[in-house]
Image (cartoon, rainbow, N blue to C red):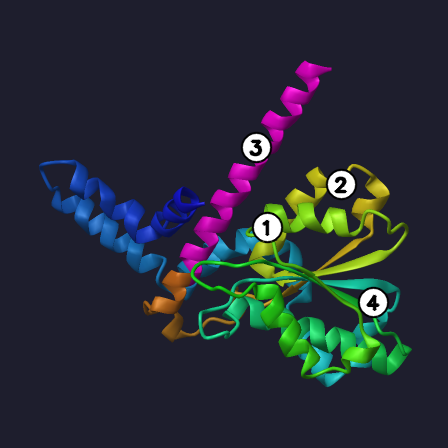
């Protein structure tokens, strides 16, 4: 776990472009200028959009989903009236028991969907929260999310299931499979950040064997990093854009890693058979 965390923390645009400077004795001014230019580009919205788009493009049709849940919920919630379970993929909590940005956005989206299903269809949909202790927090993220939800909705009318053990997306989906072991022909709505859903789908497709089960999952995106409309200010660098570029870089690395992992796993299974 430590090694994985170390590699992830080092996987940034600035580390990858500047590390060669520490590996060679002679510093070439042209390379330094190129490294600065690359860092500048991915610190702008244009550069951030370029890398984020590769992850979020399949879900851009949901870009205004969150806004619609406020403005005309009756039009959007009918798409999910047959949902039996709402799954929140937790994204961390700090030592002060405050949900990280990703966790909070996913939780709010789940809450809005739950409340509207209750309002328009009189449904108390089961909520499943996946996510254990992350980083230095002593409290599972799932517990922090559950406490927030139960302070807003009537707990007596909703069943909330926690997974306090999973530490990453792979474990999230593996543990979800165990939770759903006896559930057949149910519609499962999974909520996560838009940039994260490509990896989620990859792991779902390789974890669940039955195609009917795979088709029962509805993926809902929130917290988009991609920006539709650009202004002159978006050509100026910002730490937020560089942060988004680094998030995308790590996510792409995760997708490549699991793609290779599942290919090797399938090859091993064929060899054994």
Is label 1 in contact with label 2 (beta carbons under 8 Å)?
no
Q: Which residue is mark 3?
A: 261
CA–CA distance between discs 2 and 3? 16 Å
Mark 4 — residue? 80
Q: Position of residue 164 (x, y in %)?
A: 62, 58
Residue 17: x and y in percent read: 28, 46
Q: Is residue 85 left or right of residue 228?
A: right
Question: Do the residues bearing badges 2 and 3 touch, measured as CB atoms within 8 Å?
Answer: no
Q: Are marks 4 and 1 in contact (CB under 8 Å)?
A: no
User: Residue 205 shows which numbered tag?
Assistant: none
- Where disc 3 sits, the SS reads helix
Q: Which range is magenta?
A: 244-273
Whole-percent x, y for residue 211 in the image: 82, 40
**Distance Cα–Cα, label 3 vs label 1:** 14 Å
For label 4, count other residues whose C-alpha is less than 10 Å away and answer few (under 14), some (14-19) or many (20+). Answer: some
Image quadrant where one finds the N terminus: top left
Badge 1 marks a residue whose secondary structure is: helix
How far, Cα to Cα, is label 2 from label 4? 22 Å
């Amino acid at each position: 776990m430590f090694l994985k965390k170390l590699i992830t923390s080092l996987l940034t645009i600035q580390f990858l472009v500047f590390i060669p400077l520490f590996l060679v004795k002679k510093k070439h001014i042209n390379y330094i200028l190129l490294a600065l230019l690359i860092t500048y580009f991915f610190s702008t919205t244009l550069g951030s959009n370029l890398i984020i788009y590769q992850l979020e493009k399949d879900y851009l049709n949901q870009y205004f989903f969150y806004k619609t849940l406020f403005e005309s919920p009756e039009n959007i919630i009918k798409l999910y009236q047959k949902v039996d379970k709402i799954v929140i993929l937790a994204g961390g909590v700090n030592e002060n028991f405050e949900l990280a940005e990703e966790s909070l956005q996913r939780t709010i989206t789940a809450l809005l969907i739950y409340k509207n299903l209750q309002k328009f269809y009189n449904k108390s949909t089961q909520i499943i929260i996946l996510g254990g202790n992350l980083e230095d927090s002593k409290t599972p993220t799932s517990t922090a999310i559950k406490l927030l939800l139960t302070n807003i909705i009537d707990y007596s009318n909703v069943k909330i299931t926690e997974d306090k053990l999973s530490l990453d997306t792979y474990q999230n989906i593996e543990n979800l499979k165990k939770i759903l072991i006896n559930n057949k022909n149910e519609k499962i709505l999974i909520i996560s950040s838009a940039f994260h859903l490509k990896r989620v789908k990859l792991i779902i497709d390789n974890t669940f064997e039955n195609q009917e089960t795979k088709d029962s999952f509805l993926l809902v995106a929130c917290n988009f990093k991609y920006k539709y409309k650009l202004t002159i200010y978006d050509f100026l660098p910002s730490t937020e854009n560089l942060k988004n570029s680094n998030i995308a870089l790590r996510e792409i690395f995760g997708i490549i890693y699991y793609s290779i992992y599942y290919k090797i796993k399938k090859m091993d299974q064929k060899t054994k058979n």
